[in-house]
Image (cartoon, helix red, strand yellow):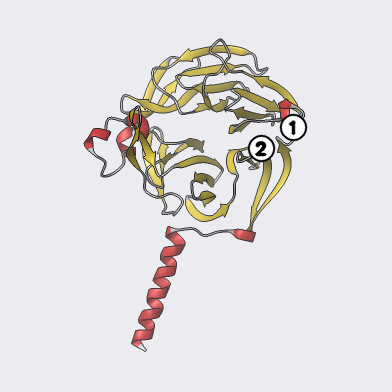
Amino acid sequence: MKGRKKIIFVFLLINVFTLFSQEYYLGNRARFECDLVLGKDEKDENYMFAEINDVKVGKSENIFVLDRKNCRVQVYDKNGKFLKGIGRKGQGPGEFFVPSFISLDKNERLFVVDYRKVHIFDEKGEFIKTFKIDFRAYNICVIEDKILLLGYKNDKIFHYFDFNGNYLESFGNISMFTPESQPIKYKEYYELMVPMGFIVLKDNIYVVNQFEYKIVIFKDKKLVDKIERSSSYFPKRKIVERTYERGVSLGVEPWLFCFISGHKNRIYISLLTSNGNVIDIFKDKEYIGSIKTNESILGVDEKGRLYLADNTDIPILKRCKLTIK
């Protein structure tokens, strides 16, 4: 009898460990109800994309879609009607080189981070100005009257600028995101250690460590909390040397890309990996389950509707409501 109790106890332990350290697939409990699809019209280039990389929704419910490969931002009304295109490939005023992410202010002015530049457009899509920065910026968010950029500069990852491009201050030490057990010779390659993305919710900044599944939370420029999870889709990663005919370069393996988005008390982590893609969902900082899908959540509007992009074949953007039973 004692032996049987021991077996049952071990079985329960294994199942509890599996639930909290791996994947709990929501399956039929999760339902997407989509009311808008963009990208299917192959006859009109205004409704076509090459690679959807970011989506933001303004107070008017206009939808701003960053097409990174086409170097432009396409704007649609809430019903999906094309309104205008902003930017094009080039290095002149209002032109993009390698745009990565976008943000909007309360007046629906558009801010585009473009490698070592930030471009600003007014609410009509007219170019206002570009200012240069002395580091590579990976992501951007406008917070009230300041611009927050993600990138490595002077051992920090977050940097505030005003709308004129004047540097204000930095925070978030890069050492928080340094991979464990890496050779000393790699420690100086801080560019590789910059997190993959961040969001701002209720004055908190959530940022994803790219070397292990950890969401670090800042408030008032200070580290206040973190969310940790173990997942087969997000193994511990490390910096590696890659040898080519022309020499050696450094990279991070295994391959993985992550998008973070959220609304109110929910956080969505979209993981793109060589083993498949998955969306992890957190509520009140607790993991509640995962959804297997080819789509990534690139934006959430004020109503909580999700903007899902599928770039696997012909890029398509969907607006959906997610219901979890």
Under mark 1, the amino acid is Glu
Query: Relative to residue 182, is residue 53 depicted above or below?
Result: above
Looking at the image, residue 105 lies above or below residue 236? above
Q: Is residue 36 visible?
A: yes
For residue 320, side relative to residue 99 (left or right) = right
Q: Position of residue 241 (x, y in %)?
A: 32, 36
Mark 2: secondary structure: loop
Residue occupying the point 62% across, 16% down: 122
Q: Amino acid at mark 2?
A: Ile
Element under label 1? loop
Residue at image coords 38%, 39%: 252
- Rendering quarter of residue 7: bottom left
Which quarter of the image is occupied by the C terminus? bottom right
**The disc label shown at residue 42, or none:** 1
Q: Which residue is mark 2?
A: 314
- Residue 51 in the image, given as x and y percentages of width and height: 60, 32
